[in-house]
Amino acid sequence: MKVNIFLIMTLLLVLGCSDNLETVVQTTVKFESSTFNLNEADDALIVTVVLDEPAKKEGNLEVMFSGSAKSPDHYIVLPELKNGILKLAFEKGDDEVNFLILPVNDDVNTGSKSITLTLQNPTDGFVLADKIANISVTDNDEGENPGNPEPIAVNFSIPNATVSESDADGLEIEVMFERVSVIQQVVEIAVGLPNNYEYGVDFHTDPEMVDFLIPLVFEAGETSKMIKFYPSNNNVVEANAELIFTISNWSEGLMQGSEFDLLLTVEEDDVINSEIHTIAELKAYFTTHEGNWYFSTDYFIEGVVTSTDNVPNSKFIYIQDETGGIMLGFILNNLLTIGDKVQINLKNATGEEVNGHKTMIGVEDRLGKVIAKNVSVQPVEISLEDLVKGTFAGQLVKISNVFFPNADGSRVWEGSHVLSSSVNTRQAVATTYNKASFSQEILPYGTFTVTGIAGSWDHLHVTGLSAIHF
């Protein structure tokens, strides 16, 4: 075995050097690189495991070694392996830790091989990120090679594929060798994404995609591996998405085949319903139906979410279209946000009066079909007299020249408080639910302009402190 002893001693002196810095409780640990190349004639390979910030305390983890290259026949590890496992320790303040892999130059052509490194079993306070690294070991000796003499072509089984956004079972993408390899091989698939299409949000894969690459490890004898692609059904009406998968990196003994890329189309299957009822039509049901009533069939409305904060609880929202506004109560917590323009199916929802508000209770369609996001709704400017009449109930409104006559520096927003006009004697009530983020803030002094949702009769539900302007 040919080993440069001087280099080994020098490199070992470097191991463990670190700065003593403070850190957060959870420290992320990963390989500095996911792929390495090691020639049999090289002196050594330094493998670095990095921490995203200096360790707050002492800790350790394990590195598991696997692959067609075996220790100590083909390489030696310093510190020493025990049963294929290397234990690495960090001191407080360390931001990296290193270990050495020394190739064994045996003067015999045994063929190129590979090593797979896997991080595992970190102690408390440390979490793993990029857990796998692959090392291609090249045999530099001439003579008969027991491995495959010609490179093996790597291809996708098909050039194009399509999957529906709502397909929960996902789609399998097959990567194939044209013939068997007698050693372990590694292939990386690069993924090109359209704008605003994100991993973990719009889709995920198995194996996991890291830095736009999907690693595939072919064990000796394997000729096919699958990538499982899972789209996310976001219930947002968008265009189809096109992704490009490319065979981009491979270990020695392989080559890129003729079918080296695949176009995957994710089809948008969220549809806009044509039969949409206005909120004015919906509110008319409260006049034509006595007591509580419900929709036994599909009944779609479309509008923009105007408030999710100052509402009875986390199940409620206000929604508004050109004809009016109304409060909706879902069967579970609301999933929509202010500014979502959305179609919602009110099938099985019940019409009830909640605190004097016309409200649809028990709405099952919590996601709806989001047509657009961050849509701005301009409030209607009204007077306190208009508010008292109840004409704008459920709508976003703005009222000027008002003040709280009972503001005393200690009263908070929660509850109901008289709201007076500075230009006449008209009064109304500002109601704030305990759920509102500002419910425990002190009522303001002075005259101001306020934006909120017009409630039943003389009530106003302020949408937030940012809606107050002096």
Image (cartoon, helix red, strand yellow):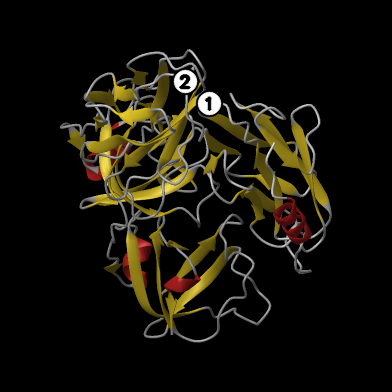
Q: Position of residue 38 (x, y in %)?
A: 55, 41
Task: Say which of 449 and 248 sits in front.
Answer: 248
Residue where numbered disc 1 is placed = 109
Residue where numbered disc 2 is placed = 144
Amino acid of disc 1:
Asn
In this picture, residue 359 sits left or right of residue 71 = left
Q: Which mark is residue 163?
A: none
* In the image, residue 194 above or below residue 428: above
Q: Position of residue 325 (x, y in %)?
A: 31, 50
Q: Marks 2 and 1: in contact by CB < 8 Å?
A: yes
Q: Secondary structure at mark 1?
A: loop
Q: Position of residue 427 (x, y in %)?
A: 44, 73
Q: Residue at x 26, y 33 (%)?
A: 300
Residue 147 can be seen, yes or no: yes
Image quadrant where residue 294 sits: top left
Gap between marks 1 and 2 measured at Cα: 6 Å
In this picture, residue 436 sits left or right of residue 455 = right
Q: Secondary structure at mark 2?
A: loop
Question: Quadrant of the image for the N terminus?
Answer: top right
Of callouts 1 and 2, the N-terminal one: 1
Task: Say which of 56 and 410 sits in front.
Answer: 56
In this picture, residue 117 sits left or right of residue 185 = right
Amino acid of disc 2:
Glu
Q: Residue at x 42, y 29 (%)?
A: 364
* In the image, residue 79 above or below residue 187: below
Q: Position of residue 72 (x, y in %)?
A: 72, 30
